[in-house]
């Protein structure tokens, strides 16, 4: 009887508990194991067993110019990609929030980039950027404009990758903001119109502030994903030419599966984890401040 009463009182916890434990282990164990490996010197090709070397791997990796350049590329790629996606996503959402002919078709077309897999997108854009047979240079040549090097030159590879990321992920921000706009109350907008406010004033002082928490939520989600971008960059350039498009994720992959330096690779991934965590925390604080 006592056992039966105990089960009845705690059913809400006991039933999901196995799933909660499984998910927690699935999330926590890789992080802790990677953190542990970052304090070791483990090279799979050396034939030597794993050995603990304290912060030796951190000192070696953090002092490498290649690592510092990878951090810079990671931040520049993320900042410009998310910034452009946020502006375009909000602008497109504001347009789609209005009634016009073909609105349903526009929403359908908006979803197309999201349903494509990033690797497939990378392969298609590789053909698009090809310097000899690519559509991009063909259009520029037809217009009498100088042709671009795109992903084959160190100076243009990051901007070219940003364009691909913007094409694929702007619709995600648009959909989130559009859902936020659909849930807004019409009363503040009607009150502003009664007071004689113009459409621009309503947009700037009423609509945008009301939907700002939703915009910041979309930016948080996109920021986390952009910092960890791997598939598009790896499919299109593999970090090249040279190291020109090597971000922290690409560098961590190379150290793991090309150089087999598991300790140093773990250092790179720990730093990436901390960057993602701190950036997300900062934007979440901004979101909380915008709701006050």
Image: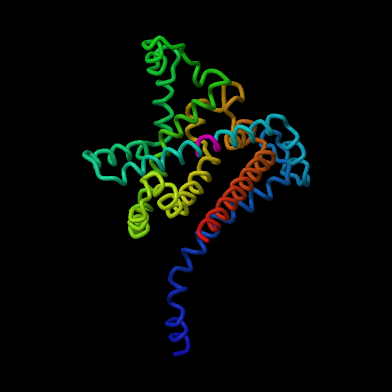
Q: State the image quarter where residue 145 is shown.
A: top left
Q: Is the image coloured rainbow, by chain, by secondary structure, or in one colour?
A: rainbow
- Queried whether the magenta region covers residue 18, the answer comes back as no
Task: Give the farthest residue toward the bottom.
Answer: 1
Residue 37 location (% of width, % of height)? 68, 46
87 lies left or right of 278 = left
Q: Position of residue 205 (x, y in %)?
A: 44, 50
Name the residue at 60% across, 24% down: 244
Q: Is residue 257 visible?
A: no
Task: Look at the image and tell me whether residue 23 can be seen.
Answer: yes
Q: Is residue 274 left or right of residue 209?
A: right
Q: Nearer the viewer, residue 142 or 230?
A: 142
Residue 257, quarter of the rendered image: top right
* Numbered range of the magenta stretch: 78-82
Give above or below for 188 relative to 215: below
Give residue 74's quadrant in the image. Answer: top right
Q: Residue at x 75, y 45 (%)?
A: 51
> Residue 2: x percent and y percent?
47, 89
State whether residue 246 is above or below residue 4: above
Quadrant in which the N terminus appears = bottom left
């Amino acid at each position: 009887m006592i056992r039966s009463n105990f089960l009845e009182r705690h059913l809400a916890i006991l039933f999901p508990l196995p799933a909660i434990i499984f998910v927690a282990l699935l999330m926590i164990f890789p992080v802790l194991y990677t953190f542990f490996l970052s304090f070791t010197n483990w090279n799979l090709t050396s034939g030597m067993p794993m050995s603990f070397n304290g912060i030796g791997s951190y000192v070696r990796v953090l002092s490498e110019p290649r690592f510092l350049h990878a951090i810079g590329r990671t931040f520049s790629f993320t900042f410009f990609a998310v910034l452009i996606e946020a502006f375009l996503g909000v602008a497109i959402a504001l347009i789609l929030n209005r009634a016009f002919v073909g609105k349903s078709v526009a929403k359908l077309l908006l979803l197309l980039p999201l349903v494509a897999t990033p690797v497939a997108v990378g392969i298609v854009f590789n053909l698009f950027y090809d310097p000899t047979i690519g559509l991009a240079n063909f259009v520029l040549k037809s217009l009498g404009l100088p042709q671009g090097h795109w992903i084959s030159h160190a100076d243009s590879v990051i901007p070219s990758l940003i364009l691909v990321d913007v094409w694929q992920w702007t619709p995600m921000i648009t959909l989130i903001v559009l859902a936020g706009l659909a849930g807004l109350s019409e009363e503040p907008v009607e009150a502003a119109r009664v007071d004689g406010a113009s459409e621009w004033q309503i947009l700037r002082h009423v609509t945008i502030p009301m939907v700002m928490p939703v915009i910041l939520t979309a930016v948080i989600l996109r920021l986390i994903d952009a910092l960890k971008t791997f598939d598009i960059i790896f499919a299109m350039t593999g970090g090249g030419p040279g190291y020109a498009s090597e971000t922290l994720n690409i560098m961590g992959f190379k150290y793991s599966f090309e150089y087999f330096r598991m300790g140093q690779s773990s250092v790179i991934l720990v730093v990436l984890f901390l960057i993602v965590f701190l950036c997300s925390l900062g934007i979440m604080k901004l979101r909380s401040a915008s709701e006050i």
